[in-house]
Image: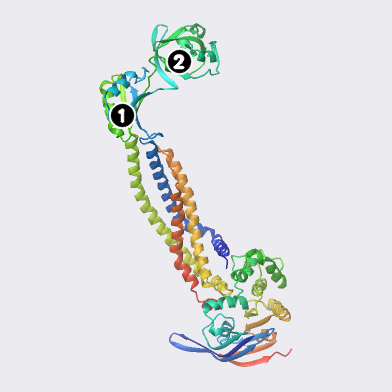
Amino acid sequence: MRFSELVKASWHALIANPKRSFLTTIGIIIGIASVVTIMSLGAGVKKQMLRDLDTTQTGQQTAEIYYNSRDMFLNEPGFDNRDVTMLMDANLKGVAKVEILQQTKKIGMTAIINDSQQAMTADLVNKPVKQPIVAGQNLTTYDFEVKNPVMLMSDKLATKMYTTAANAVGTSVTVQQTTYTVIGVYHNKAADARLPKPLYLNSSTGKQGNGIKLTFKPGAQVSVGAKQALHQLKKSGSHHRDGRYEYIDMGKLLKGISKSISGITYFVAAIAGISLFIAGIGVMNMMYISVSERTQEIGVRLALGATPKNIMMQFLLEAIILTVSGGVIGLVIGTSVAAVASMAMPFRAIVTPASVALAFGVSTAVGIVFGLLPAKQAANKNLIDILR
Amino acid sequence: MINLKNINKSYSQGGNQFHVLHDINLAIDAGEYVSIIGQSGSGKSTLINIIGFLDDQFEGEYQFNDTQIQTLKRAELTPFRNASVGFIFQNFKLIRTMSVSDNIALPLLYAGEKRRQVQARIDEQLTRVGLPDVGDKLPTALSGGQQQRVSIARALVANPSFLIADEPTGALDSRTSAEIMQLFKELNDQGTTIILVTHDPNVAAATKRTVEILDGRIIADSEVSS
């Protein structure tokens, strides 16, 4: 008999009893799903470590230190050029370069408006943005080209400082020694002002930010240098009295996760192993029942020209189809569980070819190992006894 | 075609030796319609198991056309049986989870043919047994008589040298039995060799030759006078 016909015959026998077939695969599904989930998470954390840990895309190792202001209302950035100079002079171990991570979107700053010092937030824009203007006029492309020190003020800030929006037009605002003329008032709730980005960043004291990036020499130990830098900043950073510096050691964090995941891996592997073993026993049990229920069918097939090998293959294929279907369903479930779990983790789970191969390999192996004895029993039935 | 010489068969059960067949000599030619009649326990089932290549554990000579069956290995017997014999059983022995067509296809599929090449022959046999439109149904949707017709179609499909029908009417009522016997007669008229096993003298009387077995010995072998 052709192999395709044997597969068809096996498939037919399985769907003739769908409930029983499905129940038998549940153990396989759980086993494979848990193995695939944990392998995907493991692969995800590994990839994240390699990529993010301390290596940038150019192969440089970097670390970042962030500043948190203690005063919620003082919006001044935590780092400026003094910090860069100080860190470079400190001769930190392995550090090749220090630069400020400039904030590029919405930033907090201290400004002089209407002769009084005010904390305000500002959007930095590269080109004119269309929006409703309450008074005055919008920024123009020309303003950006010639670097006109002009800005928009929000209606909220304008009414607070000058009672009406129209009053604010033509006034000036000083931010870090640059004086901007308010040419318009616009409606916005998110930020107090809109400044041209090129002008703001190029202003003499513009190099400011709440983050600092350390670039290391190849082969340097990132955490050692980063901790030295942190120590320096805490002692004599430009804003060390007003806030706190924080170094997030991604390497340490991911190493910790990786360690606990490999711990979980062994645990889950043990559970999956037991689950697969019990599932295999279930498959074997069902196959034995099937063989004894279908004694007549086996007899008919033998009488009509089936060889014992045909019969054995048919029953073995039934077991394999059963377990491989379980493996495929388990793979799908495992992938989805890993995807859902990655939402709560600082990395993305990856389904590797290895886990797909494992799902197929293990489920096929379970089918063969636990299907062989029942299939042999089916093949060795005595034809004359059956047909009597 | 079938030539049995001095066939003896014995088996042991519970330490006792049973001698079931004693010096059976029997010759059946192609085109014959033979009934083997005997009480249960007479050895007639054992005899047809040997004739139908199901049992190769016997003493004596079995010459089938030019082949000495007792010299064949068990593995060689299977394709031989597949090509030479069509079996019809008392309780039909159709596989319930498979459609009528799939049941009939089995002997051809085991002979290594492709599924799509055999459909025409299946339909041909179904028409021959008077059930042209049941191919897609499950056997359980058919009456007993219809199921027996399907099993006859299955026995015929591989175009075997002869049919063995073991109590083919045993599970059927008298009217259906008569229909099945009529079908056998038509098949024989078309040239099919049929060996029919029964304990019922009325059924045997419908064949052309009766071989009577008692306690493992042939006690009578006669033409049926029509």
Q: Quadrant of residue A349?
A: top left
Residue named by callout 2: A199
Disc 2 crowd, CA 10 A, few/some/many (<14, 14-19, 20+): some
Name the residue that disc number 1 marks.
A95
**Looking at the image, which residue is at 52% across and 86% down?**
B58
- The amino acid type of the residue labelled 2 equals Leu
Which chain contains the residue that carries disc 2? A
Task: Tell me which numbered mark, 1 or 2, is placed earlier along the sequence.
Answer: 1
Q: Secondary structure at mark 2?
A: helix
Q: Say whether residue A140 is visible.
A: no
| Position of the C terminus of chain A by quadrant | bottom right
Between B29 and A116, the residue placed more toward the observer is B29
Along the line of sight, the residue nearer the viewer: B82 or A80: A80
Residue A214 falls in image quadrant: top left
| Image quadrant containing the N terminus of chain A | bottom right
Q: Is residue A72 left or right of residue A351?
A: left
In three-dimensional space, the C-alpha distance between marks 1 and 2, rounded to whole angstroms, equals 31 Å
The answer to whether marks 1 and 2 sit on the same chain is yes
- Give the mark count: 2
- Amino acid type at circle 1 is Val
With respect to residue A278, does A88 lie above or below? Answer: above
In this rendering, the answer to whether A162 lies above or below A217 is: above
Can residue A277 be seen here? The reply is yes
Element marked by disc 1: strand
Q: Position of residue A330 (x, y in %)?
A: 47, 51
Q: Residue A286's x, y, as percent? A: 47, 63
